[in-house]
Image (spheres, rainbow, N blue to C red):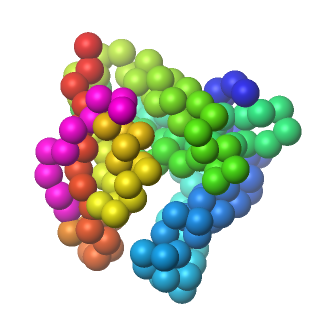
C-alpha cells in the first residue's frame, strides 16, 4: 500500500469508499436515510472535484494497487492550523495501517503547521481511539459537524505539532 495524491480519475472510487464507510459507521447512529442524504450531498462527485486542485490543501489516498482503501483531505488557511476534514478507511481495510499512513502524509504536507484540528462524531469510539492514539485531545464540541446547520454533534479534537 502506498500514499499518493488523489486525482480526477479517482473520484468515483473515492465516492464509493466514502458511501460504504459512512453507511458502515453511521447507519446505526443516524439511520440509513440520513446517511444517504449526507453522502449524496457531501460525497457527490461535484462536492469532491474541487478538492483535487484546491490551494493550501492536501487530498490523498492509500492505494493497494488494486483499490483505494482510504482517503484523507485537509486544508489550512494560514499554514499554522490544519483542518483535517476527512480521514476514512474502507471497513475491510481498517486496522491495517492505512489511516496512520494518511495521517503522517497530511501532517508532513504542512511543515509550518503548529496544530491539526478535526471533528469526530462523539459516539464513534473507534475513530476517537484512533485519534487519541495519534496524540489528539478533546478541545471542544460542535452542534454542526462538517458544515453550518448540519445538526450533527461532534467532538473537536486537536493535536499540537512539532
Q: Look at the image and give the residue range highlighted in magenta.
A: 133-142
Rendered-image quadrant of the N terminus: top right
Q: Is residue 60 part of the magenta span, yes or no? A: no
Q: Is residue 42 left or right of residue 44?
A: left
- The percent position of residue 103, horizontal first and vertical second, equals 47, 30
Q: Residue at x 52, y 41 (%)?
A: 72
- Left or right: 30 in relation to 48: left
Q: Is residue 9 above or below residue 56?
A: below
Question: Which image quadrant: the C terminus?
Answer: top left
Q: Is residue 115 above or below residue 46?
A: above
Q: Image quadrant of residue 60?
A: top right
Tell me residue 37's x, y (percent).
52, 80
Residue 139 within the magenta-colored segment of the rendering: yes
How many numbered marks are there? 0
Residue at 51% in and 24% down: 105
Q: Which quadrant of the view contains residue 62?
A: top right
128 or 144, nearer to the observer: 128
Q: Residue at x 42, y 75 (%)?
A: 29
Please give left or right for residue 5 compared with residue 146 in the image: right
Residue at point 43% right, 51% down? 126
Q: Nearer the viewer, residue 97 or 119?
A: 97
For this orientation, the residue located farthest to the right is 66
Above-or-below relation of 25 to 117: below
Q: From the viewer's perspective, tell me whether residue 2 is left or right of residue 157.
A: right
The residue lying furthest to the left in this view is 140
Task: Please state which of residues 66 and 77 is positioned toward the viewer in this rendering.
Answer: 66
Q: Position of residue 79 (x, y in %)?
A: 29, 26
Q: Looking at the picture, how far across and down is residue 129, in whole percent?
A: 37, 43
Q: Can residue 56 be seen here?
A: yes
- What is the chief secondary structure element of the magenta stretch? strand
Amino acid at each position: 500500500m502506498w500514499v499518493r495524491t488523489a486525482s480526477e480519475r479517482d473520484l468515483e472510487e473515492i465516492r464509493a469508499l466514502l458511501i460504504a464507510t459512512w453507511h458502515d459507521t453511521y447507519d446505526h447512529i443516524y439511520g440509513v436515510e440520513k446517511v444517504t442524504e449526507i453522502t449524496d450531498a457531501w460525497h457527490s462527485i461535484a462536492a469532491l472535484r474541487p478538492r483535487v486542485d484546491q490551494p493550501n490543501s492536501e487530498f490523498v489516498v492509500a492505494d493497494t494497487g488494486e483499490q483505494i482503501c482510504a482517503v484523507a483531505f485537509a486544508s489550512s488557511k494560514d499554514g499554522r492550523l490544519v483542518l483535517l476534514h476527512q480521514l476514512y478507511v474502507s471497513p475491510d481495510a481498517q486496522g491495517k495501517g492505512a489511516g496512520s499512513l494518511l495521517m503522517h502524509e497530511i501532517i508532513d504536507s504542512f511543515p509550518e503547521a503548529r496544530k491539526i484540528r478535526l471533528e469526530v462524531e462523539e459516539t464513534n469510539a473507534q475513530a476517537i481511539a484512533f485519534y487519541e492514539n495519534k496524540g489528539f485531545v478533546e478541545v471542544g464540541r460542535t452542534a454542526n459537524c462538517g458544515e453550518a446547520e448540519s445538526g450533527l454533534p461532534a467532538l473537536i479534537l486537536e493535536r499540537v505539532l512539532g
